[in-house]
Amino acid sequence: FVAYAELVFANLKGVRYFTTFNEPQSICVGGYGGTGAAPGLGSTLQMYRCGHNLLLAHARAVASFRRSGPAGAKISLNLNQDYAYPRNASNPDDQAAAQRQLIFRLGWWADPVYRTGDYPEEMRTFFTEHGIELRFTPEEQQLLKGSSDYYAMQHYSSMVCTPAAKTTLDNFGVSCTSEGTESLGWWPAASFWLKVHPEGIRAMLAWIQDRYHPSELIITENGVDDEDTGSAAGPTQSCGALDDPTRPGNCGACTLANVRDQFRIEYYRGYLYNVALAVKDGVNVRGYFAWSLLDNFEWSDGFRCRFGLVCIDYTSPTKDRIPKSSATWWQQLLDRINTASTTVVDALI
């Protein structure tokens, strides 16, 4: 991996921001612990080994970057995490479960890089109790600690947590879900795991700021999808009407109805507002990327889930690209901020 990274560094001299890995949690949990993503091993032990090797590959690539990478450029790794709430906010066991979820799923990666050079204490104890022999040497800890120049955060949704009925290697004693959260007022997107709760991004930013104190944080992904029902991927189940701003709608060929994505505008309005409030709270957010510019091939969902601000007509021989209403909204928002020198909060009101 270091050899590959060095080839990238050498050929992209004009790039200012690099990242070594995108969503280590998705790679290792989805592909090694589960079977829904490549290579689909379905082994919890391999999941933790994947994480160990990935962290070391990151640290060694960053060390090479700092020796001979492009002058003035920065490097990080992109960490995704849904915010974890206690199922019952007044229940101490649920509160502890929510914190344990954040530590085992985000602290797994972020503690070695931004805090100690090692796994969180809770994970080290868990590994010892379950005979998982994964340890970083003092030299490896030194490489890991501080191996990032900025915090790259990816966030879409939130979940609720409670203690698991039985502790296993893959649940570490916690049971979390986003299912059933419609009763809490969280509305569903096309992806089963994505429930829209704008306040969650503010809570996630506060947790990261409090634990890791990043001097620079960039939100590298944030967005919402609707479901394709008539593209080259074939017909799929409908997910509602586009004129209902509380739920994503049908998205096949790019018809007039497809591109009137008011639900996506409401998503961005709510999430950006909470990002702006987090900045006022003292979180050092320096950048934000909407996911995504174009409808894309979305992991194992293929073309079914559309995240784009621009619709791709998969039925067209030329794959026509048509800006959605959300693209116009973004342009107008940025124009208000740039021309009126107003704040994001004021521009969103």
Image (tube, rainbow, N blue to C red):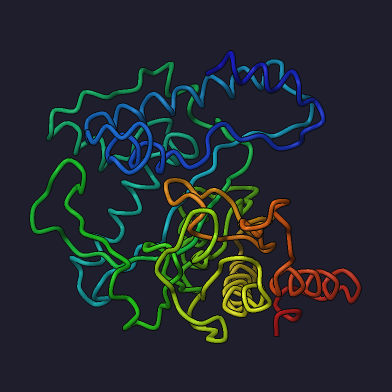
Among the 4 quarters of the image, the one containing residue 147: top right
Q: Residue at x 36, y 17 (%)?
A: 137
Above-or-below relation of 156 to 22: below
Residue 303 shows in this picture: yes
Above-or-below relation of 230 to 346: above
Image location (x, y in percent) of residue 114: 50, 39
Q: Is residue 217 left or right of residue 207?
A: right
Q: Is residue 335 left or right of residue 6?
A: right
**Between 334 and 331, which is closer to the camera in this rendering?**
331
Tell me the quadrant of the picture where the C terminus can be found. Answer: bottom right
Image location (x, y in percent) of residue 23: 48, 42
Q: Is residue 6 left or right of residue 87?
A: right
Above-or-below relation of 148 to 214: above
**Between 225 and 2, which is closer to the camera in this rendering?**
225
Q: Residue at x 74, y 18 (%)?
A: 10
Count the labels in the image: 0
Image location (x, y in percent) of residue 200: 46, 69
Q: Residue at x 29, y 69 (%)?
A: 179
Q: Residue at x 63, y 79 (%)?
A: 257
Above-or-below relation of 203 to 39: below
What is the residue that sits farthest to the top in this orientation? 3
Q: Is residue 278 left or right of residue 162?
A: right
**Between 295 and 63, which is closer to the camera in this rendering?**
295
Among the 4 quarters of the image, the one containing residue 37: top left
Among the 4 quarters of the image, the one containing residue 118: top left
What is the residue that sits farthest to the left in this orientation? 166
Image location (x, y in percent) of residue 237: 39, 69
Residue 286 shows in this picture: no
